[in-house]
Structure formats: C-alpha cells, structure tokens
Image (spheres, grey):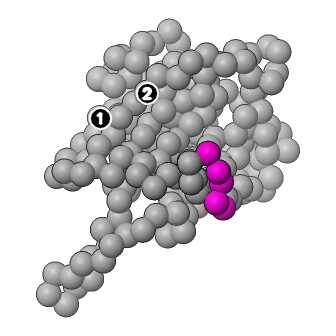
Amino acid sequence: MLFRDMPNRVSAAAQIRIGKMKGADIEFSDDLDAPLYSQIDMAVGLLKTKYSKSPVTYDGMARIDNHPYPYDALREAILNAVINTEYGSHIPVKILVFEDHLEVLNCGGLPFGMELEDIIRDHWSSPRNRGIATVFKTAHYIEKYGRGFEKMNRSYEGRASHRLRTIRQRQVSAPSSQTSSSPKASSPGTSTGSR
C-alpha cells in the first residue's frame, strides 16, 4: 500500500478523501489515489491551496501567507490518521474542511487500550500499524516518540484565534463484520483545527 500506485485496490482504507463542506453538503472533493506515502504531501498541499483561504500580509516587501492551520498540525494529524487507520475496515481517511474548522477522521480505536488522556500527554509510541510507522520513520516523516499531539498543540502557540481540540467519537461498526472501531483523527478522536 505504501508504494503501490492504486493502494485502494488492496484496501479501500488506503486512500485520503478530502471534502469542502458547507453544513452537511459537500461543495467539492478530492480522492487521493497514489502511493500511501505520497498522499500525505498531496493532502497537505491541497489543504494549503485549494481548501482554505490564506490571507496575505506584507512585511516590507516580503509577502507572508497566513495559512489558517499550521503546517505541523496538518502534517501530524494526517500522518497519525494514516498510520493508525484500521485497514481491514476499508474506510478511507477523511478530511472535512468547514468554514471555521477542519476534521481529520479515520477508522480505528485508541491504540492498545490507551485512554484519550494518555494520547494527549507524553506517552510511549504504540502505532496501530507498526510496519507503516517504521517506513515513515525511516523516511524521516515521524519520530515514533508518541509526541504527535504535543507537536500539533505547540504549532498553535501564538495563534490567538486558532486551537486544536480532540473529540472522542462514539463506537461504530465497520462494514467488515470482523472489526468494530471508532472514526478518529490521529490516534484518539477527531482532531479539529478551529479558526
């Protein structure tokens, strides 16, 4: 799935779907059909260009793009969602972009019996898909120290109108009768960046 051109042929969960939302309606969307490792950069690129408004300011002659969501927060939330997805569920990672926030969701529960509070504070790294996590670590995308939420929160410092919040989701049954899990962002719930 990591290096295959159409990884969703192996599992429908090996895909990132991005939707621009207006209430419950989808205004437009993209389904990323590329090797899994490429989808991370593609998703961040689309979120920074097509899916959000970035007011421009100037510092002297230098142009400054003021993206509503910190790059580190987007990157960490998407990486955590991809690494911790339950690929047997065949439910793809979804990124829903609303006017005032975005949500990164995946199918899977908290890893290995952890509680939400364990994920938010310092903890041991315990990715759901260790092989995928190892490849992303080898490629220097992640560190595998369990600091993703800390890094996301830290990237919001100095942004008075922005914040990261995590919402625990209810349990839902996945289409596959062998798996029951909850949609989530990163590891514990829905990561929502508000602006």
SS majority, magenta: strand
Q: Residue furthest right?
A: 9
Residue closer to the observer: 37 or 55: 55
Query: Which residue is drawn at the image coordinates 27% and 82% (left, top)?
Result: 63
- Residue 149 at x, y percent in the picture: 35, 34
Horizontal side of 168 relative to 135 (left or right) equals left
Against 178, is 134 above or below? Answer: below
5 over 103 or under it: above or below: below
Residue 150, numbered label: 1
What x and y, as percent, mark residue 20? 58, 57
- 108 relative position to 88: left or right: left
* Element marked by disc 2: strand
Q: Amino acid at mark 2?
A: Ile
- Identity of the residue furthest to the top in this view: 113
**Residue wearing tag 2:** 167
Q: Quadrant of residue 172?
A: top right
Residue in the image at 60% along x and 22% along y: 182
Q: Which residues are magenta?
A: 24-28
Could one spot residue 80 in this view of the protein? Answer: yes
Identify the residue at horizontal 78%, vertical 40% (top origin): 12
